[in-house]
Amino acid sequence: MADRQRTGRVFMALDPGPIAGPASDTRLARQFSAITDQPNVRLPGQRRAAAHIRTAAAGVDIPVRRRTIPMKRPDNSA
């Protein structure tokens, strides 16, 4: 069995309004930018949000496949 790197995840939900003051949204935006500006780093949900925007603008291609009819199985009952 191959060794897998074990990584952890931390999720925090914050309501900055009561304690951070009126400029908290600007400071948080700056903090999130500092995180996402690093190589190979993204915020949770960032890829999903980008995919949602992309599919809303361009739509989704659904490939047309030929319908196959399953072969009849041989009757093996005696």
Image: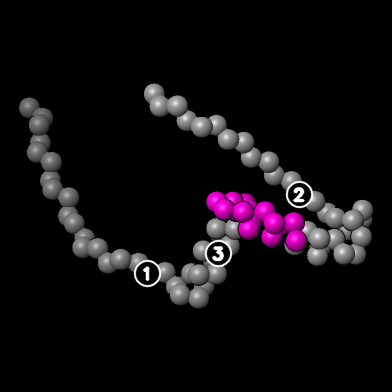
Picture quarter containing residue 61? bottom left
Q: Position of residue 3 (x, y in %)?
A: 45, 26
Residue under label 2, please give it.
13
The reply to whether the C-beta atoms of the residues labelled 1 and 3 are less than 8 Å apart is no
- Residue 32 drawn above or below residue 54: above
Q: Quadrant of the N terminus?
A: top left
- As measured in the structure, the alpha-carbon distance from the residue carrying label 3 to the one carrying label 2 is 21 Å
Give the amino acid at mark 2: Ala
Q: Position of residue 58 (x, y in %)?
A: 45, 75
Residue at image x 78%, y 58%? Answer: 28
Q: Residues within 10 Å of mark 2 (few under 14, many from 20)?
A: few
As for residue 33 lying within the magenta part, the answer is yes
Give the amino acid at mark 1: Asp
Q: Which mark is residue 7?
A: none
Q: Position of residue 60 (x, y in %)?
A: 42, 69
Q: Give the structural element (helix, strand or loop) at label 3.
A: helix
Tell me if 2 is positioned left or right of 16 in this view.
left
Q: Which mark is residue 50?
A: 3
The magenta region covers 30-45
Residue under label 1, please give it.
61
Picture quarter containing residue 7? top right
Q: Residues within 10 Å of mark 3 (few under 14, many from 20)?
A: few
Q: Nearer the viewer, residue 13 or 21?
A: 21
- As measured in the structure, the alpha-carbon distance from the residue carrying label 2 to the one carrying label 1 is 35 Å
Looking at the image, tell me whether mark 2 or mark 1 is earlier in sequence order: 2
- As measured in the structure, the alpha-carbon distance from the residue carrying label 1 to the one carrying label 3 is 17 Å
Q: Give the structural element (helix, strand or loop) at label 2.
A: loop
As for residue 43 lying within the magenta part, the answer is yes
Looking at the image, tell me whether mark 3 or mark 2 is earlier in sequence order: 2
Q: Can residue 18 be seen here? A: yes
